[in-house]
Image: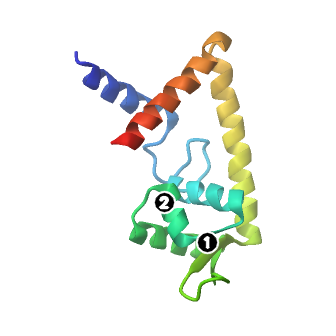
Amino acid sequence: MSEERDLQEAVARFVRAFGLHQPDRTPCGQPVPVSEAHALGELARDGALRQSELTQRLRLEKSSTSRLVTQLINRGWAERTPAPDDGRGVLVRLTPQGAEAAERLAEARGRRFAAVMNRVPEGERADVLRALTILTEAMDET
């Protein structure tokens, strides 16, 4: 079997094992679409972001991010506000309910990752993190 095929199968097994193929539930078991969870995390980290910056961070198309922000607004988790330094710019920020949802997700994510890391032999943990970094960088280059 080729290395490319081995990588494809390994990534597919990881996606399924981690639950990334379930679009309406996070891998940590929360009933939130994965894309919304990622958006909440980015907004919680920075307080407010230009919608264009959120698009770049999430690696989505502009229209997908716009729909995603609308979904967050409909849930009461985010709001759009004019950028103070640019009349055409739009900032997206979390509402208090959105900040609470982001915190719940962060806590669940922390528990899940701690449990996963505890199952990795201690002497191999750095290798796992290094391999994921190398794989991510390789994907960024394509």
Q: Which residue is mark 1?
A: 75
- Determine whether, in the image, residue 111 is placed left or right of residue 4: right
Q: Position of residue 122 (x, y in %)?
A: 67, 13
How many angstroms separate mark 2 from mark 1 (CA)?
A: 23 Å
Up/down of 85 relative to 15, above or below: below
Q: Position of residue 44 (x, y in %)?
A: 70, 59
- Answer whether residue 68 is visible to the viewer in this image: yes
Q: Position of residue 97 (x, y in %)?
A: 74, 68
Up/down of 127 relative to 11, above or below: above
Q: Position of residue 75 (x, y in %)?
A: 61, 72
| Residue type, label 2 | Gln
Residue at the image position 76 percent from the left and 61 percent from the top: 100
- Answer whether residue 15 is visible to the viewer in this image: no
- Determine whether, in the image, residue 21 is placed left or right of residue 128: left
Residue at the image position 65 percent from the left and 82 percent from the top: 85
Q: Which residue is mark 2?
A: 56
Q: Secondary structure at mark 1?
A: loop
| Residue type, label 1 | Arg
Please tell me in which quadrant of the rendered image residue 114 appears. top right
Quadrant location of the C terminus in the rendered image = top left
Residue furthest to the left: 1
Residue at the image position 58 percent from the left and 70 percent from the top: 72
Q: Residues within 10 Å of mark 2 (few under 14, many from 20)?
A: few
Q: Nearer the viewer, mark 2 or mark 1?
A: 2
Residue furthest to the front: 85
- Residues 36 and 88: in front is 88
Residue at the image position 37 percent from the left and 32 percent from the top: 12
- Residues 70 and 2: in front is 2
Please tell me in which quadrant of the rendered image residue 120 appears. top right
Upstream in the sequence, badge 2 or badge 1? 2
